[in-house]
Image (spheres, grey):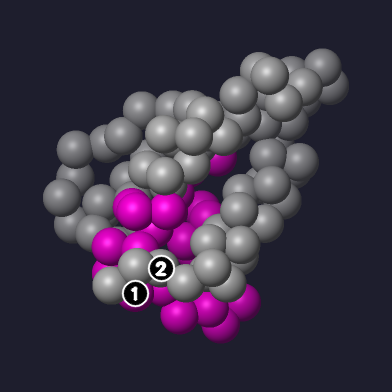
Amino acid sequence: MQPSAELRQLVWQAIEVEWDRTRPPGGIGATDSRVVYDRLIAEGVDVPPGAMDEILQDLYDRGMITGPRSFGREDMRVHGARDIIEPELNL
């Protein structure tokens, strides 16, 4: 099942909040998928298994995020298991 447009938007907003929170002056924001997932859950968002992985892969493929993927299969299913780094072109 495809993640909804609403969930995609909520994930993107959570990523941007975390980037803003972690970005050093003149630097690049970075977070990881566990932090984004935990933020969404704390806000009461339903995140189905596999949805984060699909959304993050799409953002990565479109060049909107950078960062390596982890190899934890269960973590991939739950929250995508990925470092989420702001591309330099967004500066």
Q: Earlier in the sequence, mark 1 or mark 2?
A: 2
Residue tagged 1 = 48
Amino acid type of the residue tagged 1 in the rendering: Pro
Residue tagged 2 = 3
Q: Is residue 5 above or below residue 76?
A: below
Q: Assign the N terminus to one quadrant of the image.
A: bottom left
In depth, the one of 64 and 25 nearer the eye is 64
Amino acid type of the residue tagged 2 in the rendering: Pro
**Residue at image coords 72%, 26%:** 90
Q: Which residues are magenta?
A: 31-55
Q: Secondary structure at mark 1?
A: loop
Q: Is residue 40 visible?
A: no
Task: Name the side, left or right, on which 68 lies relative to 22.
Answer: left
Q: CA distance from mark 1 to mark 2?
A: 8 Å
Q: Quadrant of residue 50?
A: bottom left
Q: Quadrant of residue 14?
A: bottom right
**Residue at image coords 47%, 72%:** 4
Q: Which mark is residue 76?
A: none
**Image position, residue 65 (x, y; %):** 53, 33
Q: Secondary structure at mark 2?
A: loop
Q: Is residue 44 above or below residue 19?
A: below
In depth, the one of 77 and 61 nearer the eye is 61
**Image position, residue 84 (x, y; %):** 50, 37
Secondary structure predominantly adopted by residues drawn in magenta: helix
